Amino acid sequence: MQPDDSVLWERTRAGDADAFTALFERHATTIYNFCFRRVGDWGVAEDLLSIVFLEAWRHRRKQLPPGKVLPWLYGIATNVVRNRRRSERRYRAALARVPLPRPELDFRDEAIDRIHDERRMALALELLAALPRQQQDVVVLCEWSELSYEDVAFALGVPVGTVRSRLSRARQALAELAAPTGHEQAEVAKETGR
Amino acid sequence: MSTEAFIPQPRELPARRLAERAKHLRRELGRSHPTRPRPRSIAIALAVLALGVLLVTPAFGLHDQIAHLFGAKPPSVIERYFSNDPGMPSGTEVLAKQARLAVQISVSGYGHQSLWVAPIKGGGFCSTAPSCDPDRSVPLLANLRVAGLTSRSAPDPRDPRDVHVFIEGDTLVPEAENLAAHYEDGSVDRTPIVWMGTPVNAGFFIYEVPKSHWEPGKRLVALTAESADGRVLARDTKSARYFRWVQKGNLALPAGVQPKPPPPPPQDLCADTCSDPEGDAGSTLDITKVKVTESSDELEVELTVKGGADLQADGALVALDLDQNPDTGSAYYGTEVELALVGGDNAREAEPVLYKAHGWDFRAVSLRQPPGGLLEPDVVGFSIPRKLLGPDSEPGFDLVAASSANHPDTAPDVGTYEIEPTGGTHPPLGPDRRPPKLFAFDSLGTHGKDAKLEYWVLEGRGRTRQVIHIYRGQRLLKTIWTPLAGANPFATADTLWSVPQNVRGRLRFSVRSFDAAGNKSPVAWASLVVR
């Protein structure tokens, strides 16, 4: 049985690279998908995944409450995505050492799916971009990543009440953005007979 | 309408890519420095140094506004500085409105130098040093700032009269009362630490490095935070390294302290007879006079010994630096030839042995016709055919005589005699590029008493300083800097350490020796057992 995150993190704090690699293997998919949902590009998300964990290793002396390793990684990922250019610049040398992807067998279908994903994600991000940055973070973490309010608060370093209020405002704003207006509204009414 | 409708289902990173990324991460972890402290702060310090170097160059057109950014007092400037990401991880907040002036010093010909501090929400603080310490993890942080007049009307921005070097920073060690600056020449300068209360709870300092300490041989070695009773609580050497780095670049030395050639080895000029004080011998053989007689085919050296020469106890030797260059030949003041008369039961029948320089040491040369020796009640003499000394275009040479004992008497006490039989002058010396040779010896001590840390340092020009670190396991217990002083290669040296009452057991110490030109020996290690 694998030790839980907190145990692995304590070992990481003591400089154990194996423990940290185990954390990477455990949470790579989660953070990879989170990064994709922030940038809409699977390739960039893969690089950001590496940066998030390199950044976490850089801050490995940080003491984390039990059960908060993943929320903390989300927090780092949020900052990495927000400061994407700076993060990529900082780790440019490290990223240059990533082996180039080799052709994957049976990857063709998935490649098409991934392109489709990126198109859908672009629409979602376009909608999200209308929100203030802080509200975007809360929407992505609460709704898209399904973190609890408490974990989101920990990840962003804000009180739980702030998470709730930001999410509430974000939902309201998104509802207004998505509501049909003008001729759209009239056509909807005609179709439904109202 | 919800945005969730657009969100694609999570996907796995392809297994091969995941494995490659994990492998890559593992490799990168190995690359990162395990104990690298506050890389952001270091980067900021380097950036500020670079800015400082630029500021003293008018061609870049950076003038008063930038120069006064850190030194000016208007709170709005300081507030903007703290509001504008002074090196904090994103997501944390510096309380810029709560910024306070921690230290301000007045510098003649420059104005005021100030250090402002602002707390961080959730703990820690940022300062204009510049640094941020949200985790409160660094006991002593010192940054070097090169500052000065930058207006275009300044006569010459590289003129060191207009340039000032400051050390600014903070300490978290509650007992710290003073910041001590340790210099290469062994001197120490102290400046008080100013403490700020809650929520900052740290001590701050600004110290100007005097221009007299910009000169090689007198430069900054380390900074320590000290308690009121002089105990070293924390130590920093980065600032000293940055200072040398800046000096290599664009920082001119003040007028009047341009680098001087290192001093020649201490020498007494003798036509043919040199004297050495009586009663300065730690052994039975007390050399009081050295007489040299040269003829066209032979060189004779006579040592007058007070109280009689007992070669059953000690031997005697003379070593010659034929090319009068202490940076070539053996590590014994650069001597190339040594004649030694070592006693025994049949000492009166003993013959001198000729040694020639071999690496840093000597190697005996077997001769069909050995050199001559003379042993009288008060005289030990050597004679050697000139042809054995090799071709010699100059009649002058340098000489040192010594007893070969555990605590030898050497004549002179440090360095060599310059023998100029025809009244010639010493040839000029080039730059000294040869580092000292160093050995450390296992030592013993008693807790609560002085322990003698023994080592042996050999330096051609006869002047060194040492840096000694004492460890228990990986933990540094003490650092000792010895001042630049004469180093006699014919004797071992020692430095005393007052062992604390609570320290016992097996320790270890390292020694590194620096000569006057700054050449450094490799580090030598030895054990120290404290009973």
Image: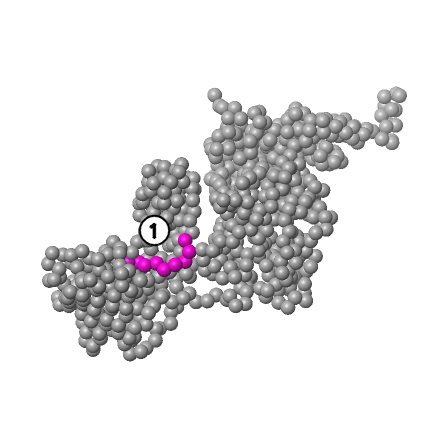
Above or below residue B82? Residue B392 is: below
- Percent from the top left, x then y, of residue B126? 63, 43
Question: For this view, does B437 lie left or right of residue B350?
Answer: right
For the point 53% across and 31% down, which residue is it? Answer: A24
x and y, in percent, of residue A43 in the image: 60, 38
Q: Is B487 contained in the magenta span?
A: yes
Q: Is residue B54 left or right of residue A2?
A: right
Establish if B202 lies above or below B438: above
Res. A58 image quadrant = top right
Of the 4 image quadrants, the one containing the N terminus of chain B is top right
Residue that numbered label 1 is attached to:
B494
Comparing B224 with B365, the one in front is: B224
Q: What is the number of callouts on the image?
A: 1
Other-residue count near label 1 (Cα within 10 Å), few / some / many at <14 / 14–19 / ≥20: some
Q: Residue at x 62, y 60 (%)?
A: B108
Specify the quadrant of the image occupied by residue B462: bottom left
Q: Nearer the viewer, residue B195 or B421?
A: B195
What residue sits 69% from the left and 40% below the top?
B95
Chain ID, mark 1 = B
Closer to the camera, B337 or A9? B337
Rendered image coloring scheme: one colour
Report whether residue B38 is seen.
no
Q: Which residues are magenta?
A: B482-490
Tell me if I can see residue B489 in this picture: yes
Q: Quadrant of the C terminus of chain B?
A: top left
